[in-house]
């Protein structure tokens, strides 16, 4: 079934909000080699994560991180390919026995956030983002993802003679989005051939997540994370002195009215009983002096949807509101809705998800695998999962005993990853990879 048809059918079948957690599947056997590898690699993975955390790099600028990863892969006897999508790194591990091909992906980039965790290895890095000086921080956990996959690569490399099949390790830059005027992320990785010479039959990824405690793994089949689109609006007026506003056209007033009126898209125009929708304005910039009405105001924001028709409808409605409100104020509008191709819905292949639930349950332990609700956050892992069946799961980041509802969320300057999540993430990805490699060919043939 084509991905879009499959996605539409799945969307109609799920409720808007998460119900009680689904009955946990019978856990598969806990692989002793997974437990042994996790124990032996624990200190290394923690050290890698702390080092990467202390030296964060923005999207398309992950030069040091990519170097650390490539050096590690070479030390494992692999031949990394570097410079993909600017700073991406990949490597292929061939097992000693024939079997399926899979890909394991981790993202490497940090965010323009000034860290306020107080950690002894906290970032003090700074950089320039959208023309402004800012702190740089791993406020989303990509440092953990990179360290976990480095550990998984070392564990699997140590088992290569017994392995059935081949594994492509994908260390990806710019998951948070390439800087304006640049390309990057999963889309550029694919464009530059990450799956061209090595076409996997399945791709796996994980994300540490503040809404779960660090002893839990979350997963859901079908649509999981929202489609994400960035928009930009330039409201063009005519500059005049602030004491005589009638002498010009005030783009600030028009921009304020556009922001206000756009709230009705979600609250009054979209059928959110079908699927949730979000329209958020994230920044407004215009003017430089208290008594000058400027020529123009720029607005940027994000749209999140789970349904392709609703996605296009939001684009049209926001464009219409911006144009008509601007015109009513005597202004004009330069609308970029969307500003570029966004991320589609992150879709977990149903058959693959159900097949790997016992593996995740084994890694998590009894009662620790939970059903995730729909997540309005987005991931460009969705682009890999549009090419081949994909599974993206979540590892808790908040310490056991703390309320994940009130814990600092991903992208917060106070966000931190309980290091127990590193151990759990390593065990989960290893268990999933090994279980799939042992049975992947048969399952692939059955599909």
Image (spheres, helix red, strand yellow):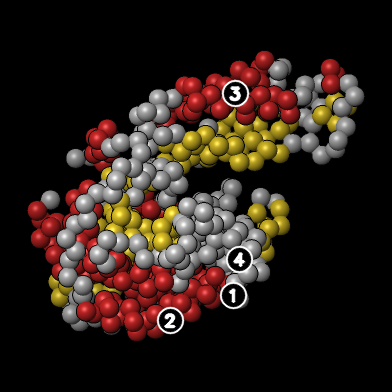
Q: Is residue 149 left or right of residue 326?
A: left
Q: Is residue 311 left or right of residue 2?
A: right
Mark nearer the viewer, 4 or 3: 4
Quarter of the image with the N terminus is top left
Per the model, the C-alpha gap separating discs 4 and 3 is 37 Å
- Which tag, 3 or 1, sits closer to the chain's start? 1
Q: Which residue is mark 3?
A: 261
**Percent x, y of residue 408:** 54, 57
- Which tag, 4 or 3, sits closer to the chain's start? 4
Residue contact between numbered discs 3 and 1, judged by CB atoms under 8 Å? no
What residue appears at the point 44 percent right and 54 percent down from the top-left corner?
211
Residue contact between numbered discs 2 and 1, judged by CB atoms under 8 Å? no
Residue contact between numbered discs 4 and 2, judged by CB atoms under 8 Å? no
Q: Looking at the rendered structure, which numbered label has been put on residue 121?
A: 1
- Which tag, 2 or 1, sits closer to the chain's start? 2
Per the model, the C-alpha gap separating discs 3 and 1 is 45 Å
Mark nearer the viewer, 4 or 2: 4
Answer few, some or many: residues within 10 Å of disc 4's Cα (few below 14, many 20 plus, some between 14 and 19): some
What residue appears at the point 36 percent right and 66 percent down from the top-left corner?
215
Q: Which residue is mark 2?
A: 44
Per the model, the C-alpha gap separating discs 4 and 2 is 22 Å
What residue appears at the point 53 percent right and 72 percent down from the top-left corner?
52
Q: Which residue is mark 4?
A: 117
- Which tag, 3 or 2, sits closer to the chain's start? 2
- Which tag, 4 or 2, sits closer to the chain's start? 2
């Amino acid at each position: 079934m084509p991905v879009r048809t499959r996605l539409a059918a799945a969307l109609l079948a799920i409720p808007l909000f998460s119900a009680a957690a689904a009955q946990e599947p019978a856990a598969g056997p806990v692989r002793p080699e997974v437990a042994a590898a996790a124990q032996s690699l624990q200190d290394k993975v923690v050290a890698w994560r702390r080092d990467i955390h202390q030296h964060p790099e923005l999207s398309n600028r992950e030069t040091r991180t990519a170097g650390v990863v490539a050096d590690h892969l070479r030390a494992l006897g692999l031949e990394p390919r570097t410079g993909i999508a600017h700073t991406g790194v990949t490597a292929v591990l061939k097992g000693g026995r024939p079997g399926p091909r899979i890909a394991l992906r981790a993202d490497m980039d940090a965010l323009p956030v000034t860290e306020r965790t107080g950690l002894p290895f906290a970032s003090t890095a700074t950089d320039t983002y959208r023309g402004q000086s800012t702190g740089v921080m791993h406020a989303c956990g990509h440092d953990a993802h990179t360290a976990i996959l480095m550990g998984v690569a070392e564990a699997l490399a140590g088992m290569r003679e017994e392995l059935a099949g081949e594994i492509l390790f994908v260390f990806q830059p710019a998951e948070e989005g390439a800087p304006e005027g640049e390309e990057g992320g999963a889309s550029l990785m694919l464009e530059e051939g990450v799956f061209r010479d090595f076409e996997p039959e399945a791709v796996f990824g994980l994300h540490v997540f503040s809404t779960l405690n660090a002893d839990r793994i979350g997963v859901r089949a079908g649509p999981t994370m929202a489609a994400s689109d960035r928009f930009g609006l330039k409201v063009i007026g005519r500059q005049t002195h602030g004491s005589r506003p009638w002498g010009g056209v005030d783009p600030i007033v028009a921009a304020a009215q556009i922001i206000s009126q756009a709230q009705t898209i979600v609250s009054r125009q979209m059928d959110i009983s079908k699927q949730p929708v979000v329209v958020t304005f994230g920044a407004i910039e215009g003017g430089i002096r208290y008594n000058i009405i400027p020529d123009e105001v720029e607005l940027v924001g994000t749209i999140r949807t789970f349904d392709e028709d609703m996605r296009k409808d939001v684009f049209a409605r926001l464009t219409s509101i911006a144009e008509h409100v601007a015109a009513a104020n005597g202004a004009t509008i330069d609308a970029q809705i969307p500003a570029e191709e966004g991320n589609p819905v992150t879709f977990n292949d149903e058959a693959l998800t159900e097949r790997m639930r016992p593996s995740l349950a084994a890694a998590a332990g009894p009662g620790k695998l939970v059903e995730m609700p729909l997540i309005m956050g987005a991931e460009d892992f969705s682009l890999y999962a549009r090419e081949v069946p994909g599974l993206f799961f979540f590892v808790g980041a908040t310490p056991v005993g703390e309320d994940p509802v009130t814990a600092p969320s991903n992208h917060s300057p106070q966000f931190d990853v309980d290091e127990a999540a590193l151990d759990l993430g390593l065990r989960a990805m290893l268990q999933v990879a090994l279980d799939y490699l042992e049975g992947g060919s048969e399952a692939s043939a059955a599909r």
